[in-house]
Structure formats: C-alpha cells, structure tokens
Amino acid sequence: MAAKFRPYPGTRDFYPAEMEFRNWMFQTQREVCERYGYGEYQAPVLESTDLYRAKSSEEIVNEQLYTFTDRGDREVSIRPEMTPTLARMAVDRPASCLLPLRWFSIANFMRYERPGRGRLREFYQLNVDLLGAKGPGADAEILMIAVDLMRAYGASDDMFVVRISDRRLLDLWIGIDDREKLRRIGRLIDKKEKITEEAFAEELAKECEDPELESRVRSFLAMDNASLDRDPDEIVAHLKLEGQKADDLLAVLNHLIAVRLLLRKSGHEAAVLFDPAIVRGFDYYTGLVFEIYDTNPENRRAIFGGGRYDRLLGQFGKEDIPAVGFGMGDVTLEHFLEGHGLESSRTVSHRAFLTLMNNDLLGETLKLASELRSEGVHIEASLEATKKFGKQFELAEKKGFRYVLILGEDEAKAGTVIIKDLQTGSQHAETRHTVADYLKKR
Amino acid sequence: MAAKFRPYPGTRDFYPAEMEFRNWMFQTQREVCERYGYGEYQAPVLESTDLYRAKSSEEIVNEQLYTFTDRGDREVSIRPEMTPTLARMAVDRPASCLLPLRWFSIANFMRYERPGRGRLREFYQLNVDLLGAKGPGADAEILMIAVDLMRAYGASDDMFVVRISDRRLLDLWIGIDDREKLRRIGRLIDKKEKITEEAFAEELAKECEDPELESRVRSFLAMDNASLDRDPDEIVAHLKLEGQKADDLLAVLNHLIAVRLLLRKSGHEAAVLFDPAIVRGFDYYTGLVFEIYDTNPENRRAIFGGGRYDRLLGQFGKEDIPAVGFGMGDVTLEHFLEGHGLESSRTVSHRAFLTLMNNDLLGETLKLASELRSEGVHIEASLEATKKFGKQFELAEKKGFRYVLILGEDEAKAGTVIIKDLQTGSQHAETRHTVADYLKKR
C-alpha cells in the first residue's frame, strides 16, 4: 500500500528529538511537585460522558468533546480536562485521599477545537492541586510551586512574572448587586490586555452606563503591586464601604498581604506581582487567581494560570472541599522555554557510536558495548560490517554522534579502544576500562 | 450531586502509591532502552481507522477497536497497538528515521475485550523496535535488551527464561507444502503449554492424519537447547533433506547458533534457551521468535515476547524494511515483579513531614521547607496550625511518614530543627543545615 497516512488533524507525532525535550519538560514538573510532597496520579483516557455533563463548561460538552457510544452502549468521552477525574477519584477512594491532599498529574487531553485558532486538538497538561486546605499558607504553597517550576527550567526571575489577585476583590470593590453585570465587567477586564485602550474604554462605558460605576472600575484597575503595601483599613475607608462589605474587603486584602509575606519569607516573591486585572474567565474560581506571563514582549499570552475553587468538588461528591491549583499546558510552556533558549539547560547523556570492523569481531564488539552500557554510557552499536568502513562514520555523523569508538583485532588483544572525535577529527587509544570515564568527562 | 462515578469498565485509576510503582516500571524501561541508543517516540492516542484496516488483525478491527466518527466526519480510533503508528511515522518523515532505526515507546492502548477474560480494556505497553537491520547481531541486540530489562528490575537470571526459536524452523522441518495445515499445526504447538498432553496428542493426530507427518512434528518438538550444540549439517542430513530446503534449514540453524554465541559473548546467555515450541500466534513473524517466561510455577503465562517481522512495514510504505522487536505489557510485568518481591528494589526518595507549631511561624516554616527542598528532600508541610499539635503527628503517621520535623520559636532562634522518628519514638535536635544530610543517610 503506497497510501500515506498522516497524524490526525490537530495532533502531533513526537520523534525522538522532540520526545527528549518533552521528557525533560515532564520530568522537571515531576521533580518539583515531588519536592513539595505531591503524589502523582493517572487515570483512563476514556470517561463516562456524564462526568463532563455534570460540570464541564457547555462549550466543552457541546462543541469540543470527543464523545461516542461504545460497543456496550455506554456514552463515553476522551478526557478534555483533568478536574472531573480528580474529583471522581477523590470521592471514589476516600481512604487513599487523606486531606489535605496534594496531587499532580501529567496527561494528554483532547478537544475538538476549530481549526485556525492556533490550538491543538491533543495537548498535554500538568495539573497540580491542593485539596482540603484553606488560608494563605495553601495559596502561597501553590504559588511557590509555580515559581519553582519556572526556576527549575533554568528561568531567572526576570523572565516571567506571576500576576496574582483575588476573584472576590472586584465584586466587593464595585459593590453592586447585579451579578450578571459584575460577570460581564469581569470578562471585559479579563480581555483588557488583548484589545486596544480605546476599545476597552468604549466597551466599559457602554457596560457601566453609570459614570460613578465606571469610575469605581477605573479605581479598581488603578491598584497595583504597591497598593498591598498600604494600610488596608485606609483603602476600605477611602471606598466608603461599611459593615459586612467593608469587613469582607478587608479580609480579602489582608489575605493577599499575608500570601505575599509568605512568598517573601520563603524566597519566592521576586517574580510575584499583585494585579487587579487578573480575574480569569472561569466562573468556578472563589478566591486567589493568578497567571504567569512571559516578560518577553514577543510572547504576551499567559503561560499558565490557576486559582482557588472551593465550590467545584462538591458538585461531584457529597460536600465542598476547599481546593487550589493550576494547569500548565505543554504548548505555551514550550514557547516560553524556546523563546528564552532554556532547552539548552538540559543535561545531555553520554553517548557514543560503536563501529564494527568486521563480522568476526561482532561478539567482542557487543561485549564492549555491554561493558560501557553498564557504566552508564549510551552506546549505539553497528551490528553488521559495511563494505566500506567509512560508511559507519558517515552514519554516526548523520545521527549526530560526536564520539565514535573503534575496536580492531589489535585493540581487542591489547585491551584498548580507539576514540575518534568527529568534531576535531582527532583520535587516540584509550584502555578499555577508562573509555566510559573519558566519555563522561566530555 | 451525590451520584458516584466509577472508572470506565476494564480501565484503572492510578492513585499515587500505584503511580510510583508504574513510574519505576516505565523509568527502568526508558533507561535500559536509552543505554542501547534507542530513541523514545510518542504519537496521538487517536488515529485514522484506515490505518488499522490496513494491517491490524481482523479480530482487532472488527471486535476490539474503539472506533467512532468525529465532528468532522472522519472515522477515527483509539490506538489498539503501536506498530501501525510506528510504520506511519517512519514512512512520513524519512529524514528523521535514518536506518538502522532504534526506537521505543511507552504508551497506553485500548481494546474492547470481552469481560471475564481477565484482560483489561486499557493497558500500557513498551514497544522496542530495531528497523533496517538483519543478521544475528540485530536479533541478539533485541534479546540483550529483553534480558537487561529483567535484570534492571533486580531479577536474577534464575527468575525468568527467554525461550527463542525461529519461525521458519517448523515449516522447513515439516517440509509439506500445505500452508494452511502448517499454520494450524503452528497454532496447535503455540497452545501446547496451555492444554494437557493427552489433549495435545489427540489434536495433533487428528490434524496430521499421516503418522509420518505426526512423527516429524514429534521430532521437531524433541529438539531442545542442546540441539544447537550439535553439528547442524548432521541434523539436516538426519532429516533426509536435500537441495534448497536443506540449505534453508541449515541457514536457520546456523543463524540461531550465531545469535546464541553473541549472547554468550556479551554476557546475556544464562537465561536464554532454544525451544522449538515457541512459534507465536501472529502470522507476521518471519524469523526469530521469543517469549520470556516467569520460572515461578505459580505464574506460567509468558511475560512478554517478540520477534522478527521483515514483511510488515512494507504494507504501510513503499518497500519492506527488516524489523525485529517486542512489546512488553504492563499487567504481566507487574505480576512478575510482585511475584518475586522485586518492587522493593526501588530506591525510595528522602521525605519528611514538616509540622507547624503556630500560625505566626508559617513564614519561617515555609522558609525551612524551601531550604530542604532545594537540597533534594521531599517535604510535605503543614500550612495551618491545629488546635491540638498532636493531630499533625497522627496525620503524618497515616500518610506513611517516618520522620516528622518540628520548628518552634526556640529552634527558629537557635537555628535548629527537631527530628522525630515515628518508628522508634525518639527525637533529637539537629542544626538546620544538617537536617537534609541526616534524612538522606536514613
């Protein structure tokens, strides 16, 4: 059959060079999360469609889900996100889920995105969640993990900024009771960075109608990182709030101040800024919200984000469980890492190409390969002699090897190996038991 | 919603304790394959159904495939096996696939298995393939990887046996032209281990009809590991074969002898035995076939197996590519590892539970946590003080921690930390910068 098959539209094949990069991305995530005592979990790629009907957004369920009926007449879907599965697992085996629960997973997801939006239909995402813990300590821990992840990739604190806010801040600041209007104002603020200032002003005036309301939104957006250094009582007094609303706003401001203080104390504050414009589009957030941005002006999209969602898990089980976490997609992360040249911070394994001078030497060559492998060197060995010995060097070069090993009859007898450096063209003999050390020192 | 969702039938959730085991299984596979210069690849979980129609077995396509029509009217399937994807990728980007090509992948697959067969609908499999290489060296390399995998899990050579044969051996030995009968005899031999001797004898007599043919099958099965120590010319002469058939049988025997010699030379022979009864059920094998068995009499199923399939890849691309490889499923491997208690050979990470004495100490506690994490210790930190301090010790114990760290005001001032060993009940103060070392030495 000569027909050429391609990967399914919107998905990617990962050839070894790409996979090595991904393994580095994922292994780094694993290491950072484990440092914080987070346990990794995984689940089937297929779930009952009802699980998503329960709570995923209508857009996901009606337009994006890969859903079908199985041979046993069950409605099933390829997972489009992890949170419903997390909730299902936490409810299903409570004995394995002592609170506070610290969990993470690295998994693939599928969504039927419309072509041309620059989105993929299969993507990978790290999900990190802390369940059953409230208070500034829990919010601070999630932010510490986010910062440590970026640092673990070799990013310095000036390459990224973590913008934090609290979802309740806008409602309390604006102080109106029309929840639909509040939600629309929130969405408008969420897209502020993506539209021109004029367009934002126009839409805001249209939405607010009342100039007093508009000026409240403007004063809300005028807050910046330094606002948290002010006395929160003064801020509340300045807004002329009283009673419960004043107490609530004060509590939110004090919470943010406490979170920032913990980040300072633990050495994670440098890249964190308070920014009231961070609201995040999803309705399920109930407190902290944050987004991590690339400081590279060429790449203005958020790399990833998250927040607190204390009322989501109750919809899957019997009761609400406080929860805070984030999801980190592979595509935006990859753009960040490539934009800053951070992929070169990977440690490269020691590797060499082992030639075969003639077929009679194959046994001795495989023996040498086994010795070197057991010493931790990655050896790709020639398994058949070529008519022209030089062909093997050409292949090694094409495959990107720098070091080529040669074992002739003389070397086999003398217990030596010739190491040729394809980059400099030089070669020298090394005693057999020092070859691994020699390669490891390069 | 109080409805309880369960994982899809025949699939598994992996909670952190199970996931830690799997990560060890998969990471070990990765390390062994990389030592041999194999590159890891990965592909989308969804493929065009036509890819499987092209070559997967009828059972897979008609009965086991998770297949559906997507929102763009494409017929798609969740992958049931890796080889079609491997072939697709190798044909699609030849520049990334210089021959000989050494590739492996660790992926999940779905098949709609009938319930009650003890099979799962979602399973994981390591696939290891060497493309574009013929000769005993290539076959030996694949067997070396299989042996090294078992050893990397801590298995000694007496815990498993690698039974090898050559798919052509039966045809040449029996010497009849009826290919359908040959195939049926092959399948009968394949299931010999699973039925009684009497049942086998009965089925064999019925299949062969001719006593002369039956005696040929018996003499074929009478071969054992020692047969390869005999002069292959004698074996061929004894069978009274002549001409091309004699030459072909001689070549196959010499090939097996050469493979075994290479395994001996490279230190991989101990667990490898020639066994003519290994034929493997799949029609696509063209040469070497092998299966790895547990020597534990409680577990008689093959753990995994593979072989040479020189004519399969041509069906996806323009020309045949010699290929040898194997697939190692997670379920049978897990049974083997548990049966021999090998999971305890995992290296366990250094971890401790960090208590919080009062909420004023949270900043200092998170600072200590950050210090210890940067030294490689996994720290789960309390983020809120409990009314009774002892509650935190109870939680640490339930979560399986042995070491609990205490940082009170006095310790914070003195630069010390109290380490309590929950196993022995003893505790002592350690200077702050030696805590990580202390924990690492346990």
Image (cartoon, coloured by chain):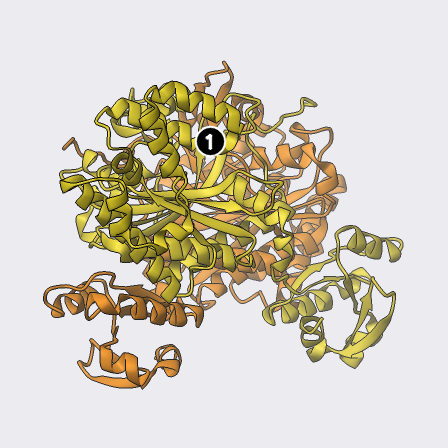
Chain colours: A yellow, B orange
Q: Nearer the viewer, residue A204 or B290?
A: A204
B384 left or right of A195 in image: left
Q: Position of residue A45 (x, y in %)?
A: 39, 36
The number of numbered discs placed on residues in the rendered structure image is 1
Q: Is residue A202 left or right of residue B385?
A: right
User: For the view shown, which residue lies furthest in the top direction?
Assistant: B73
Report the chain holding disc 1. A
Q: Residue at x 88, y 53 (%)?
A: A387
Q: Secondary structure at mark 1?
A: helix
Position of the N terminus of chain A by quadrant: top right
Q: Is residue A379 visible?
A: yes
B415 w.r.t. A18: above or below: below
Name the residue tied to disc 1.
A192
How packed is label 1: few (under 14 Cα within 10 Å), some, or many (20 or more)?
A: some
What type is the residue that disc 1 sits on? Lys
> Based on the displayed image, in which of its 4 quarters is residue B424 positioned?
bottom left
Residue A165 position, x and y percent, is: 36, 45
The image quarter in which residue B194 lies: top left
Residue A216: x %, y % from top left: 33, 33
Q: Quadrant of the C terminus of chain A?
A: bottom right
Name the residue located 28 percent from the left edge and 24 percent from the top edge.
Answer: A53
Horizontal placement of B361 versus A156: left or right? left
Q: Residue at 86%, 65% (x, y): give it.
A: A424
Task: Give whichever of B24, B164 is nearer the camera.
Answer: B24
Residue A36, x across and y down, in percent:
36, 61
Residue A16, relative to residue A369: is it above or below?
A: above
